[in-house]
Amino acid sequence: MDEQQFVQLLEGLLQPDTVQVKTATATLNKTYYTSPASLNALLQIVSSHPKPELRQLAAVEARKLVSKHWASLPTEQKASLRNQLFQSTLNEDVTLTRHSAARVISAIATIDFEDGEWADLPGYLLQAATSPTARHREVGVYIIFTTLETVGDSFPGQISDLYKLFTTTIQDPESAEVRINTMLALSRLAMLLDPEEDPKGLKLFQESVPGMVTVLKHTVAEGDEDHAMQAFEVFQTLLGCESALLQKHFGDLVKFMTELAATTSVEDDYRSQALAFLMQCVRYRKLKVQGLRIGEEMTLKALQIVTELGDLSSDEEDVTPARSALGLLDILASSLPPSQVVIPLLKALGGYFSSPDPDYRQAGILALGMCVEGAPDFIATQLHEILPLVLHLLEDPELKVRGAALNGIARLADDLAEDVGKEHAKLIPAMIKNFDLAVNNLQGQDDERNLQVIRGSCHAIDSLIEGLDPEEAANYVPELVPRFSKLFHSDDFKSKGAAIGAVGSIASAAEKAFLPYFPDTMNALSTYVRIKDSQDDLDLRGVVCDAMGKMASAVGAEAFEPYVLPLMEASEEALHLDHPRLRETSYILWSTMAKVYEEKFAKYLPGAVKGLSDCLDQDETELEVQLGEEASELVGSEIVVQGRKIKVAAAADDDDDDDSDLNEAAMDDDEWDDLSGVTAVAMEKEIAAEVYGDIISHTRREYLPYLEETVTNLLQLVEHTYEGIRKAALGTLWRTYACVWGMAEGEGMAKWQPGLPLKVQPTDDLRKLGNLVMIATMSVWQDEMDRGTVTDINRDVAATLKLCGPAVLMTEKGEVVSDIAQLLLAIITKRHPCQQDLGDEGEDEVLDESSEYDWLVIETAMEVVTCLAVALGPNFTELWKIFEKPIMKYASSQDSTERSSAVGNIAECVGNMGEACTPYTSTLLKLLLHRLSDEDPETKSNAVYGIGLLCEKTTNNDEILKSLPTIFSKLEPLLDAQDQARLLDNTAGCVSRLIAKFPDKIPISEVLPRLVELLPLREDYEENKPIFDMIVKLYQANEPTVQQLTPQLMPVFEKVLGPPEEQLEDETRAQLVELVKYVRK
């Protein structure tokens, strides 16, 4: 082997000349790297070459060749090489080279340990790690770390000896590097540790945690940035390991990080790292955080940190403690119960809103905005106190506070559009006033503060207007559209986009009232439909496309017809412009057009289906591109190539001093997938999968030629690593099943009947489709870690059972009822994987309180229980034995939402079981009677409904008759609740069911006049059926009280037979029409 040429070629790899690098690489791969001698030569260079950069490169190249050639080298040569390499690494001056050489040693050790060779390496490492020379200690511990990384459990000797060593090295008095390398090695041990199998190891590890915290404290105190970042990363890694490792010190660790984050004398980077750690804690150790009741402290500290934000308009890409604190508030609100986050936040906000310091006023409203999404139901109950304060901030003397208030309203309205929309008469004029002031005071395109208010007003109105009725929204069209239209040609891209987006939403809310402004608006925006010269152009084009879609929904098919073809052509062109967001906009536009044109969208189906199919076919593996030296500033960042986000790698080196792969090895692949970053392509696929659902359910029969291929494509996505895609694919599959079912019924397939075995057989196509969808769903539903995905599956299955009955419960593997029942039971008792912390098996105690999203999983699972009762009818009685106790427990919860959901669920199950509810009469009656006195109107209303159904359905009449006096004594006071329409409607329904069941046991002459006073119903139209069924029966029996009440009943009959149509079912309407004819005679 020509050693001189070999060294020259290696030096060629270090040149900035790309052509030379390519040539040298090709020659090395072809001529040299095929021979074991090349590994020997590389190791000689690592050990003795004078140039550190060449030693570094040789180490990188040698590491790649070890697995290929080490075993082929002669035994005596290997012995000499091991010794040389070890000694030279111990004495290497350059850190990067030292680390690369250490990784070569680990690679060799991996092979040697398997072959029973290099048995003395652990001894040498121990010696080096305890050497009086700091450099030797650094290298010794680092090689232990890299060797643990590669050989794992195969590391020779007793692991307890390593813990003993690390107890010393983590306190190294001289070298921060030794201390950090010890932390890295301990993080490796953590990944290998199974607490159940190795309790001794667990104890040793737990004892090492305080030392690790001390190392982090020192690096932060000394401003040692590189080592501090490594220490933070170790703690992030530990969150991904078995939870028992940190359990003993978890509370102290969270408190330490919270204090660190809040300490303003510490550098911002460290504070942001501490906040990032806290976010991961809340995300992956949510139950631990909740159990320790430290949510309130974290919330108030985060709120304080937000006061440091300064101007909202500063570079949004910067990671600052204040921005990170807003992110933490967002995660806290959606992960922990309101008592730990939203309630303490709201208590603190008064002082912030009234503070003389504008930074505090700004922080208060921004923090509130961040928490809305996580606890919308609770915040909705507090709006009567929140909105006056927000209105006050809209008149704040400080521009930035008004900007923040607009941001707050936009966020409130995003999640509570209807509730916030009720205050439109106060809010919209205040926003217009802010908008006008900012426009008039604008000092050019650099006046970021006024621009912030202009954009903020547009965004806030954009969110708020969607919550208004068309008649209410119509009043604002002449006020808003001319104002915002003036910005369509603004020089500020962001303001232009905000105004266009707002006009789209105004159109969507006002519907036909937008028509007078429609032609001019389309004309003004048409110039942007095909722009593509810059990134800003493509962004704006996406906003315009979205807005036009909303306008199409508003003005309807006929008015929009002239614009469809050019817009569809532009949307298909947009697929080829390397802009993921613009492609998503095209898909959403197709979804809107399908809704507007329904079957007439058929002529665009070939293009749309191809576009969506191409999207799902995109490759998602993370590409890396290697660029020459001139692009070095891009290294590590992401660029967009052909619409795909691609990570830029350095020109040659694959082995930087990089321990960032720590996290990756901390968990097995499945768990890592759950945490991996989401690519732009994955998010695009999520949208595409959802859009399929809209197009299929609106074009119906026209879609059939494409259906089989689409279903196949979607089935391939249900186990995707990104939860958004799993959710969207399953959602669309269920919508498809319901759509095909509806078409089959439209073609004469008999209406389904409750119960198994099936009384009505579905078509073959439906049977096949149902089988595929249910099997795919079960594969995800049982083990899904993502709470939102489980919630959506619950909703999908419930809606389908209600609409299509029990057929989907039969698969080729048999019926899935018992599997579904066990799965629902796990959710209702908070034992499902999506309700556990990462890596836990649900052995911890179950916490009583839930965040709103945690409760939503349970509530939607109870909805599936209800819909199983709908689909199974009397067969459901056996299943009720499984669900009775856990659901009744929620019916006695401290939380009114939980009580009302559970009582409603019980009522629906009784109604659907029919007579089969009889065995449960006593237990259920006792519970429902108790709930008739509930302080919560919703729970009380559901209990009234349940009592009525139980009395109607059960055959245990003695039990009911015995309780009649109690029932009426509890119903009587409810009649005074004039402001609670649903409660009165349900009371009327309940009494009607009692009269129908026991006409001779109830004093009709006393009860009926009071009942008629409650008519017509105001809200719960379902109860019209039992009421008018009962009234018709009384007329048929010539009952005297009802005859006397005819003058009061006639106006009621007229009202319910008029609009709105949904007041009566067809059967009840027909009966009532006959009755009115009879009475008039």
Image (tube, rainbow, N blue to C red):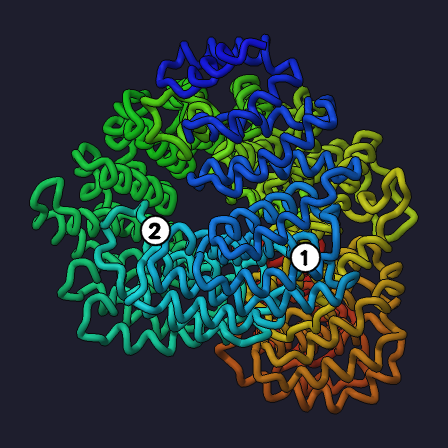
Identify residue for label 1. 839
| Quadrant the N terminus occupies | top right
Q: Amino acid at mark 2?
A: Val
Measured as percent of width and height from the top left, residue 746 is found at 72, 34
Q: Secondary structure at mark 1?
A: loop
Q: Is residue 922 above or below residue 334?
A: below
Identify residue for label 2. 319
Q: Is residue 1009 above or below residue 193?
A: below
Question: Can the viewer see residue 964?
Answer: yes
Q: Earlier in the sequence, mark 2 or mark 1?
A: 2
Q: Please state which of residues 94 and 789 is positioned toward the viewer in this rendering.
A: 94
Query: What's the residue at 68%, 91% (across, down)?
Result: 969
Report if the CB atoms under discs 2 and 1 are less than 8 Å apart.
no
Left or right: 946 in relation to 380: right
Instruction: For marks 2 and 1, give the CA distance.
Output: 29 Å
Image quadrant in which you'd find residue 972: bottom right
Q: Amino acid at mark 1?
A: Gly
Query: What's the residue at 75%, 77% (across, down)?
Result: 995
Total numbered circles:
2
Left or right: 954 in relation to 513: right
Query: What's the residue at 78%, 57% (across, down)?
Result: 823
